[in-house]
Image (cartoon, rainbow, N blue to C red):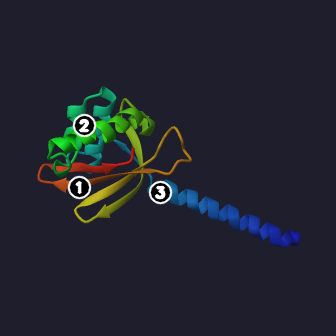
Amino acid sequence: MNRRMMTVLVLALVTTAWLGLQAYAATTTVVKNPGAGTPEATLTAAFQAALKGDFKAYLKTIHPDERATIQQKIQIERYSWARFKKQARRYLITVEPMTYAIVRREDETGGVRLFIKDQTQPDRMPVPVRLAKGAGGWGITSNSL
């Protein structure tokens, strides 16, 4: 490969990388003091519950359909709560005031999926949290935090 062709390829790669970073920066939203009644407010309440170790408060952020039975509540406490409580701080930019980054938002029928950036492992893929709107507002239906 000649020198001119190599230069063109390097410039193309640098330009592509720069455009990718610009697209990433344009889609990242830093959440701080979200408005009441939003999916972000529900997720913020879940983070606050995790930092306090308050399972009852966390359970209130879960969609009612996902916590309707005792068995569901037991499963939530054993698995998603245990993981969420342990890892919540990894996703926070700051604790006071509580801020975190949403790098992608996908609207779905009846809900939304928010992809949260891991602040301790920047190369890790953003983690999805799925929320659905119910009679009482937004509730988490699943999360991989």
Q: Which residue is mark 2?
A: 58
Quarter of the image containing the C terminus? Answer: top left
Question: What is the crowding at mark 3: few (fewer than 14 residues within 10 Å), some, or many (at least 20)?
Answer: few
Residue most toward the front? 71
- Which type of secondary structure does the marked residue at label 2 adopt? helix
Residue in the foreground of this view, choosing between 100 and 85:
85
Q: Amino acid at mark 3?
A: Ala
Checking the image for residue 42, the label placed there is none
Q: Amino acid at mark 1?
A: Ala
Check disc 2 and give the amino acid type.
Answer: Tyr
Query: In the rendering, which numbered label is found on residue 132?
Result: 1
Q: According to the image, label 3 marks what residue?
A: 26
User: Label 2 vs label 1: CA separation?
Assistant: 16 Å
Label 3 near label 1: C-beta < 8 Å? no
Residue drawn at (50%, 54%), measured in percent from left and top?
25
Q: Quadrant of the N terminus?
A: bottom right
Foreground pick, 101 / 129? 129
**Residue 78 position in % (x across, y down):** 30, 37
Q: Gap in Å between the C-alphas at discs 3 and 2? A: 31 Å
Q: Position of residue 58 (x, y in %)?
A: 24, 37
Sequence-first disc among 3 and 2: 3
Query: In this rendering, does residue 14 appear at all?
Result: yes
Judge from the rendering whether residue 57 lies leftward or rightward of residue 85; answer left or right: left
Q: Nearer the viewer, mark 1 or mark 3?
A: 1
Identify the secondary structure beneath mark 1: strand
Q: Residue 61 in the image: x percent, y percent?
A: 22, 42
- For the residues labelled 1 and 3, the Cα–Cα distance comes to 25 Å
Q: Look at 46% across and 50% down and name the residue there.
A: 126
Q: Position of residue 139 (x, y in %)?
A: 22, 49
